[in-house]
Image (tube, helix red, strand yellow):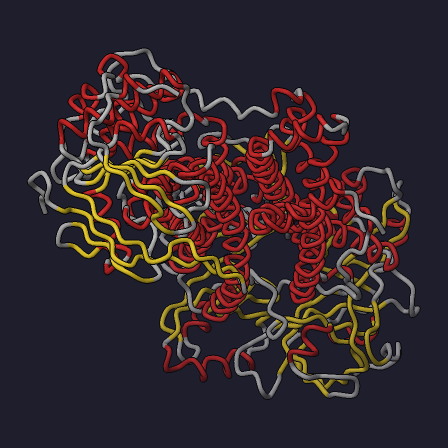
Amino acid sequence: MVISPLRRKVLRDLRRLWAQVLAIALVLAAGAATLILGNGAYSSLTETRARYYDTSRFADVFADVTRAPRALLADIKAIDGVLDAEARIVKLARPDLPGMAEPGSLLLVSLPDLAGAGLNRLYLRQGRMPDPDSRREILLSEGFASAHGLGPGAPLTVIMNGRRAEMQVTGIALSPEFIYALGPGDMMPDPRRFGIAWAPRASLEAAFNLDGAFSNVVLKVVPGVPADRVIAELDRLTARYGGMGATARKDQISHAFLDAELKQLSAMVKVLPPVFLLVAAMLVNMTLSRLVTLEREQIGLFKAIGYSSRAVSVHYMEFVLCISLTGIVIGLVAGAWLGAGLAGMYARFFSFPFLVFTRDPQVYGLAALVAVTSAVGGALRSVGQVARLPPAVAMLPAAPPACQNRPGRFRPFPGLRQTGVMIARHLFHRPVRTLFSIFGVAMSVAILVASLWSTASINLMVDVTFFQAERQDALIAFATPQPARAVFAGRSLPGVLVAEPFRTVPARISHRGLSRRVAVTGRPQDPRLSRVLAPDLRPMAMPETGLILSQALSQALGVRPGDRVTVEFLEGARPKVSLPVSGLSIGYVGLGAAIDLSALNRIMGDGMLVSGLNLMIDAAGQDAFFAAVKAAPRTEFVTLKSMTVTRFKETLAENITVMITVYVSLATIIAVGVVYNFARIALSEQGRELASLRVLGFTRREVSGILMGELALVVLVAQPLGWGIGYGIARAMAAAFSSDLYRVPFVIGRDVYATASLAVLAAALGSAWLVRGRINRLDMIKVLKTRE
Amino acid sequence: MRVDGEGKTVLRATALSKVYQTGDVIVPALRAVDFEASAGEFVVILGPSGSGKSTFLNIVGGLDTASSGQVWFGDMEVTALDEGGLTRYRRDHVGFVFQFYNLVPSLTARENVQLVTEISRNPMTADDALALVGLSERQHHFPAQLSGGEQQRVAIARAIAKNPGLLLCDEPTGALDSATGVRVLEALAQVNRDMGATTLVITHNAAISEIADRVIRFADGRIAHETVNSARKLPAEVTW
């Protein structure tokens, strides 16, 4: 095969400039990889979820009731727009595992009588379904089973409704309802302490005295019918059976968490890839325009001997295409590899029967296309210049940089040494390149600022939530509200130092057409263990009348302190009252409303009742406490703050290490790409000057100091700009991440800016060091003999 | 160090050799050259391309190292200096003028001269140096705004501003037309006369040799011929 001379030149140029080519290709690759990662993960998650929901007939509406007769199901199915409905028994129970001292919970869910019927159908991973007539057989969720090494055939003691029952595991299953399986009171899934067990309906009916009754109903709605209408009708039907207000799929915990993850992914796709692609385009522009300047005479020669302008332009475009090809190959491989890693991470948080990182050629094709487009876009100006250069002009050396000055003008850089003047003039005479470079370095700082801030913000969230607001060591929730004497019983449990009651009642709070379903929590007037904090973190006393709403809830409802809201309680006599908003509290998790405990009980009108206790426990008495709680019949679940916090921090620590590694690598790629290319181009332009200075008696250090000085200025000026851009991105991300589930506090400390700058400075120093060798090897003799 | 007194030897090379090796190919560029120049002497070096004259000048100026032999500047052995020593030697004692001027395009004429005065131990002012070459009026111009001859005179001003003991010029008029070249030579001759710097000028142009005290002709890496001019001509009397 004969390679044309021009194509051979492309290959040689690539080999000669390999380091610059690689640096640009890596920036492009990062753009392509993050695009694949974001889009791929997004499409993997949405498609997998959609397919899973579809095959398992995942419900659209969910509702809890205290006890409703099964006959009601026919009425529910008859609601206009309901496709199908399943009545279930859903109850919390406690597993008694020999190897587990701390209390855990199992959510028991009844299975439909007909195997393979109903909604939220299970995916059987191992073993078989329980025999519908058996009172002992259960299926376990995969996470819980593997955390405890339980497989088909294993025995498991479960405390149901205060009674111990010896059960047997027949199989391991997954459900679309619990893709993200969050235990009561937890902030992160902990498969060790929380699991789901499915049992035949008859066995749960017997255990919870619900013969011929159900406690939960799930509905499939005809596509296109608004869920709100169905919910209104369903709430009307279930109200007299203790209906607590139905929720649509969008508020179902597992679904909502997946949505939050998808939201974060789409925010990432909007921020990261464009940054890389933009920087790559700038780098191509800088490098190619220098190459074209250097090769003016060659371009003229090509044209003089008969190559068309088009052929010569195509030659330079081929050079750029080779760069983008290199970047795309690296980007596709890295994207697929990172994608597999991300899918692995998702597999730990989300229980899908199958989750593969996308192999959709469109995702990869789009990344490749976008990468090529940005590289070609960056090259257009220079290639246009190549096409326009007349051969005669091209063969003359380029006009010297426009250092024009009126004679006798005062010195524009007073106080600078001449080497300093050189630095300043070089930067000012190529303003576009200087600005590009500053912007590029700033973007690498920005990426770091925009990613590192979340650590401090999460720490603040943990500190405020677990150490300033919720100061209890343990929380006991009763299966049904208990009279006030339960407080004294709780106080007398072994190890308990302080017991503080609370009552939660589900309610729908509305204000001018906006409404939210929340749990209203009644607390003692001056709570000490579970506190409500004002935005300035001062503890708030419970108002005698009125509600304290979390800031998130007040925004969702559009209310301010002093406004009145309608509160429709969804328990007992279901009182509907109008209450003033007395104050706003800070809160990062969920939507919250707080009220004085006595006031709540007065409204409910069913006596002094409590839903549970917040406890302070003597560390020495912890084991005795665990044992006593396990035996206590009325306890539905117990959460331990230390476990919740530990789990939260562990998970976070793992993710943060991965995240910081990824983001620092990405920022380094940009910083090195920009600084290295800037330095090489500057060296190529000034090599002759610098070598001349060496001849004049400047030391190597002084000469490299000139180039390094330019780099240092670019890098330093870029820092505050990067901080500013990073701050903006971080702020936008905090807003984008916030949902009804989470509210991400936006805090960004000086340490974030410092860390970002240090990482980028290190990358810049590294690239400068790579170029310094070239400065030291400058050929002094050659420059004396050649015209520029 | 100072080099004083007319007639005293300031530059001495003994058995100076330089061999270039590229792969298996060995090219001798200088073959045991012996040379002396006295303070204030104006020496023109002639010779065809590849005869070794530039290699000689580069080693004497501390830009290149010898394969064997010695160069002494006063009582300093230049050939024994390391990288840092050579830099200091060039900085303190040697002024260079090149064929292509090698000015810094981003600095004005005056700033180009200041570039050197800032790092020298005993410099004259940039204004004086520019006045010596007759360019006071043009000192705020950038190189791109100056003619070739003017640029070369800036280069001379830059070379002499440090009060060098040794002024080395490699084809200083090579890129200039005759009339402009004469002006440059006048500047060189004047500087040599006023400051007493020992001046070595490499040229292809035999006509220039008439303004020298002594003319050396290189051939094949050796000094092939040496003439002493009994009477130096003025640059204005030379044409080519």
Q: Is residue A739 left or right of residue A545?
A: right
Residue B56 location (% of width, % of height): 33, 48
Q: Residue at horizontal 25%, vertical 31%?
A: B212
Q: Which residue occupies the extreme left position in the image?
A: B5
Image quadrant assignment for residue A196:
bottom right
Examine the rendered structure and indicate whether residue B110 appears above or below residue A203: above
Give the camera-side residue of A136 and A729.
A729
Nearer to us in this view, A297 or A506: A297
The answer to which quarter of the image holds residue B186 is: top left
Pinpoint residue A782: horizontal percent, then vertical percent: 43, 43
Q: Nearer the viewer, residue A279 or A41?
A: A279
* Image height of A439 relative to A57, above or below: above
Above or below: residue A149 compared with residue A738: below
- Residue name at image x 54 percent, y 41 percent: A733
Q: Position of residue A464 (x, y in %)?
A: 41, 54
Please give the count of numbered marks on the rendered protein. 0
Instruction: Give left or right: position of B224 versus B50.
Output: left
The residue located at (41%, 67%) in the rendering is A499
Looking at the picture, how far across and down is residue B64, in whole percent? Answer: 34, 52
Asked whether residue A762 appears in the rendered view, the answer is no
Residue A633 visible somewhere in the drawing: yes
Between A40 and A650, which is closer to the camera in this rendering? A40
Residue at 60%, 38% (x, y): give it.
A284
